[in-house]
Amino acid sequence: MHTYDAIVVGGGILGWSTAYHLQQLGCRSLLVIDVSAPAIATTGAGAGFVGAWAAGFGPAGWGVNELALEEYSIAFYRALGKRADIHLRENGNLFLARTKAGYDAYIAPMLTHALTPKDIQSFGPGEIAELSEGAIAASEVYGATYHPRGVQIHTTPAVKTMADMVCANGGSAIYGEQIVALDISGGRITGVISHNGNTYQAPKVVLACGAWSNEILGTIGQTLPIFRVVATRVIGEASGVPASLPTIMIPEQGAWIREHKGALMWGTGDGYKEVHDLPFDLPVGTRPHYPELVTSLTRAVQESFQKLFPKADLAVREWTQGVPVYTVDRTFIAGPVPQVQGLYVLTGDNEAGVTHGPALGRLVAEHVMGVPISDVDPAVFAVNRFHAMYADEVAVQKAMPPRR
Ligand SMILES: Cc1cc2nc3c(=O)[nH]c(=O)nc-3n(C[C@H](O)[C@H](O)[C@H](O)COP(=O)(O)OP(=O)(O)OC[C@H]3O[C@@H](n4cnc5c(N)ncnc54)[C@H](O)[C@@H]3O)c2cc1C
């Protein structure tokens, strides 16, 4: 039997960010438990784009609260990047249109959006080619907006840096143990129990279990309206892609692209598949391995991307997949579980957990420590904000609003 002030179950970006902020707020005795290791599951697949998505590009419905999370997280990574090498690049975010139709549908509205950052810039083809140091062919683009304060990171060193900082300050971590039950007495959480029978006691427990959130919540009869998707990213051969390249989004192609060690890294909607349609199970704490999605992804865009980046070698050198968790209203779930005192949940990353993770971790830590909530209305992210019932993930998917 081991006793702590707080336990965080899950050592992805959301779990470690929560642990970091708990400690900052004075939580002395803290344990993070993961069935795997830090940033091994979905976080390890994250492409590391961090930006002000709520300012016009994110899902319909994102607004000032999501933007406040984003601004905090951008500042957090800038500060973390000064303490350790998290591969921070302050290159900005470029939202690109290849055609006039793409520009009119997606890019132009960003310039007039109510939350558009004041420092956003509008670029024509020549400026885009120049910004990319010649990597992008001017003839292949129509126009773009550029947000200079957006950053990019590598998720694994960022999470490991947070974990190292927490453990250096007296926090503890246990890897390789799966939590299979929650200990509850008189409506209060008292601890968690692992697969090998170990009990870890604490009056406060945060579940940051990503794609496996409903598995653990199901043990106490709770289900969140979430929907899981496998997402794929691929990396081409190193071919002199400039490290100064901003992160690039091409909404009309559902595409995102960045530089990675002199190569291009990219993904599009062609590399996604609903978990409920997979021909295999998703063991807790693992990343899927589904090569069919790599084939469909490369088949769909290779030719088009080769024209856009004529000098890049797009032969796939490596690829990885993770499982983002979407919510029925497309925003995050972060706060107390009303039915059980002392129990909190942080999930529903909506494929934006790298961007929002630091601020969401702070939000949950503030709930746990009972201090005033910074910057956001916590009701927007409340666990009990969902009033409808959804039979399964298919029903959640159908009820979700479209992307902008
Ligand atoms: C291809 C791809 C690209 C992406 N790109 C971006 C991007 O550019 N920008 C961005 O903002 N977001 C991006 N995302 C999304 C981002 O990666 C996720 O939002 C984020 O990693 C989710 O973090 P998490 O901590 O919730 O999940 P995870 O990293 O999966 O962490 C959950 C942890 O809980 C552990 N766990 C679960 N159940 C238990 C249990 N019962 N007992 C013990 N441990 C347990 C698991 O082992 C795991 O380590 C991308 C995702 C993918 C897949």
Image: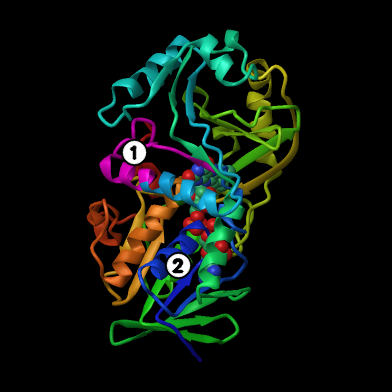
The verdict on label 1 being within 8 Å of ligand 1 is: no
Q: Determine whether 89 is above or below 305 in the image.
A: below
Few, some or many residues within 10 Å of mark 2 (<14, 14–19, 20+) = many
Circle 1 is placed at which residue position?
A: 401
Name the spot of residue 279 as percent of width and height, x first.
63, 51
Circle 2 is placed at which residue position?
A: 19
Give the Cα distance between marks 1 and 2. 32 Å
Region rendered in magenta: 48-71
Name the spot of residue 159 as percent of width and height, x first.
55, 57
State the image quarter where residue 147 is shown: top left
- Earlier in the chain: of badge 1 and badge 2, it is 2
The verdict on label 2 being within 8 Å of ligand 1 is: no
Nearest the eye: 365 or 251: 365
Nearest the eye: 390 or 76: 76
Q: Looking at the figure, which quarter contains the C terminus? A: top left
Few, some or many residues within 10 Å of mark 1 (<14, 14–19, 20+) = some
Amino acid type, residue under disc 1 in the picture: Pro
Q: Is residue 222 visible?
A: no
Name the spot of residue 359 as percent of width and height, x first.
38, 53
Instruction: Look at the numbered disc 2 and give the secondary structure of its residue.
Output: helix
Decide whether residue 46 is among the magenta residues.
no
